[in-house]
Image (cartoon, rainbow, N blue to C red):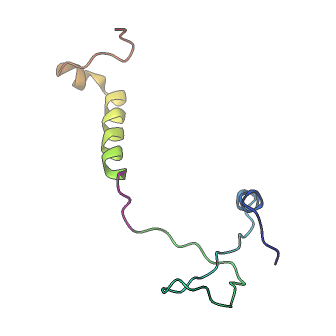
Amino acid sequence: MARMNVRQMWAAKLAGKPVPAALDVPANGAASGQASSGVRERTPFSGMVLGIDPSLRELSEIVSYVRDPSVFRVVGARPLDARL
């Protein structure tokens, strides 16, 4: 299989075609003589990404304000259309 550039890989991914997997590199960092010949199955990420939790909290506050702004006006928030 010929190597694909980034543009070709994205085009294949968006078209729903299989994208070749990256070469497997051993833990010691030395590249082996065997190239990955197949397409690797996607596995979901089950870890935590730093910085996502504060962003999600902030976004949830914005969503709750848009759903019911009267709760926030009680504590002094201005309406969204208020000009300075």
| 64 shown above or below 4 | above
Residue 27, percent from left and from top: 48, 85
Residue 37, percent from left and from top: 72, 84
Q: Residue at x 78, y 60 (%)?
A: 8
Q: Residue at x 30, y 23 (%)?
A: 69
| 32 shown above or below 22 | below
For the C terminus, the image quarter is: top left
Q: Which residues lie in the magenta part?
A: 47-51
| 50 shown above or below 62 | below
- Residue 82 found in image quarter: top left
Residue 1, percent from left and from top: 81, 78
Q: Residue at x 61, y 76 (%)?
A: 41
- Residue 36 found in image quarter: bottom right
Decide if residue 12 is on the left or right side of residue 30: right
Mostly what secondary structure, the magenta segment?
loop
Q: State yes or no: residue 83 in magenta.
A: no
Residue 50, percent from left and from top: 35, 56
| 30 shown above or below 76 | below
Decide if residue 44 is on the left or right side of residue 50: right
Q: Residue at x 32, y 51 (%)?
A: 53
Decide if residue 19 is on the left or right side of residue 31: right
- Residue 7 found in image quarter: bottom right
Q: Residue furthest left?
A: 75
Q: Residue furthest bottom?
A: 33
